[in-house]
């Protein structure tokens, strides 16, 4: 996968002939991506982003800027688009209501359809198939729930298996891609 150098926008090499002016509309037509065109590059999102604070390679403002410019391949094939932790810190603070968390998911959905899936998703998918959950369940969680008078969480993979069977194409895409990443 391509690395987006997000240290500064001026570091980004732009080949005009490779720009896709329709990319922003493609994202805007994807569920969750509708408000990308409202971004006026104020930088609030990157200022409050906990991932950007720890990882200088991640900059949601720059990803949106590159998408608006039409750097389609660079954006879709980058690892950076998978780094958003969906914490929603930017979502509630963006003055333009861009809904960056949802925009990032919309970009990830387009990337997935084109086979650009981060290999870490394979582990999550395996766990989902085996347990019906993407996060491991330990006794600790249920002990805490018991203290709060909440019912225990029971692993049940049946319904997720049915969904995964319907979406098997996605699974195959992830497997193919992660095998490609290992080569
Ligand atoms: S906070 Fe909103 S308007 Fe400002 S750069 Fe981020 S997405 Fe764009
Ligand atoms: S939702 Fe994603 S982009 Fe926004 S602040 Fe959280 S990690 Fe950063």
Image (cartoon, rainbow, N blue to C red):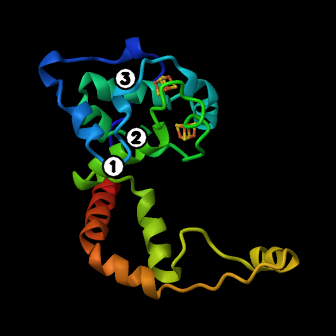
Q: Secondary structure at mark 1?
A: loop
The percent position of residue 27, horizontal first and vertical second, equals 28, 39
Q: CA distance from mark 2 to mark 3?
A: 12 Å
Q: Along the polypeptide, which appears first: circle 1 or circle 2? A: 1
Q: Is residue 5 visible?
A: no
Check the image and name the residue furthest to the top: 10
Q: Secondary structure at mark 3?
A: helix
Q: CA distance from mark 1 to mark 2?
A: 8 Å
Q: Which residue is mark 2?
A: 103
The percent position of residue 167, horizontal first and vertical second, equals 29, 72
Q: Is residue 115 visible?
A: yes
Q: Is mark 2 within 8 Å of ligand 1?
A: yes
Give the camera-side residue of 67 and 130: 67
Question: Is 37 above or below relative to 145?
Answer: above
Q: Along the polypeptide, which appears first: circle 1 or circle 3? A: 1
Q: Which residue is mark 3?
A: 65
Question: Is 45 above or below relative to 31?
Answer: above
Left or right? Give the position of 28 relative to 48. Answer: left
> Which numbered mark, 2 or 3, is in the foreground of this view?
2
Indicate which disc residue 59 carries.
Answer: none
């Amino acid at each position: 996968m391509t690395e987006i150098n997000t240290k500064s926008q001026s570091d980004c090499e732009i080949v005009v002939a490779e720009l896709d002016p329709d990319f922003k509309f493609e994202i805007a037509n994807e569920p969750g991506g509708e408000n990308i065109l409202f971004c006026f590059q104020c930088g609030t999102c990157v200022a409050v982003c906990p991932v950007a604070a720890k990882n200088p390679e991640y900059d949601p403002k720059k990803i949106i800027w590159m998408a608006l410019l039409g750097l389609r391949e660079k954006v879709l094939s980058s690892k950076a688009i998978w780094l958003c932790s969906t914490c929603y810190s930017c979502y509630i603070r963006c003055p333009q209501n861009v809904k960056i968390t949802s925009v990032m998911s919309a970009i990830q959905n387009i990337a997935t359809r084109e086979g650009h899936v981060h290999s870490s998703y394979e582990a999550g998918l395996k766990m989902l198939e085996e347990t019906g959950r993407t996060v491991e369940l330990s006794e600790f969680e249920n002990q805490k729930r018991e203290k709060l008078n909440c019912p225990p969480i029971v692993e049940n993979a049946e319904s997720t298996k049915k969904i995964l069977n319907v979406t098997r194409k996605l699974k195959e895409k992830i497997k193919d891609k992660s095998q490609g990443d290992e080569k």
